[in-house]
Amino acid sequence: MTDMNLHQAKVVEIHPLESKDSKWIKLDKIRYLDPTGTVREWETASRATRVKGAEIDGVGVVALLEKPTGKEILLQKQYRPPVDGVCIEIPAGLLDPNESIGRCAERELLEETGYVGHAIKVSPVMFNDPGFCNTNLRLVYVSVDLSDPRNQNPKPQLEDGEFIETFSVPLAKLPQSLRELAEQGYFLDARIQNIADGIELALTALQG
């Protein structure tokens, strides 16, 4: 693989894009009735790639590494042009035709990180930004057995144009780790920050 520095990536130009020229997204204007019966309009974006008949666009993968010292969660660093910054994320990807949700999560984990895992839990459907678009996903919890020989030297199978750095942090220390990464200038994907917030809320509840 060619040496890379995620922090060298940057936006060099932005220009308007029409739906007819877009490969991945499309824009629509919705006419709808509000709760009073008034007709209103709403501008929205959607993925042009959702599998026909599928309820979701893709999955987010909560990959838990089973270590003797405790569970660690697998994270990624990836430059994202829309925010012009390096984001901290969980592995994720789009659903393929005739693919189960669990299989999608296991495939994306293998492709993006090289780890072989087993899907153990699937979340309800989650909408990313329902005031703006209809994109959605399910979170899939995947257990990664580090004693499996296939996980001794994981090698990602990245597509052209994918530049991802993978690392892990102790699950119990996730909230603090994310705060430190944000202070270093990384952008936090809402999904991983929500998991961290859930951990802190659970600890608060236990403390009474």
Image (tube, grey):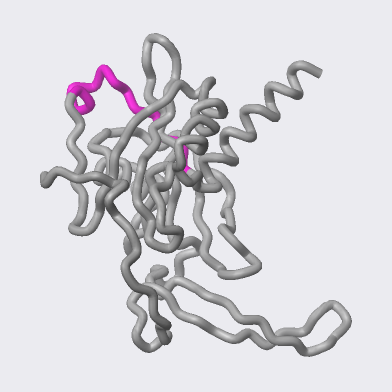
Q: Where does the C terminus fall, quadrant-wise? A: top right
Determine the residue located farthest toward the right in the rendered image: 36
106 with respect to 186 (left or right)? left
How many marks on residues?
0
The reply to whether residue 144 is in sight is yes
Determine the residue located farthest toward the left in the rendered image: 1
The residue sitting at 26% across, 41% down in the picture is 110
x%, y% of residue 9? 29, 54
x%, y% of residue 138? 51, 50
Nearer to us in this view, 5 or 55: 5
Residue bounds of the magenta highlight: 140-152
The residue sitting at 77% across, 89% down in the picture is 39
Q: Where does the N terminus fall, quadrant-wise? A: top left
Q: Is residue 33 above or below residue 159?
A: below
The residue sitting at 19% across, 45% down in the picture is 4
Residue 36 on the magenta segment = no
x%, y% of residue 146? 29, 21
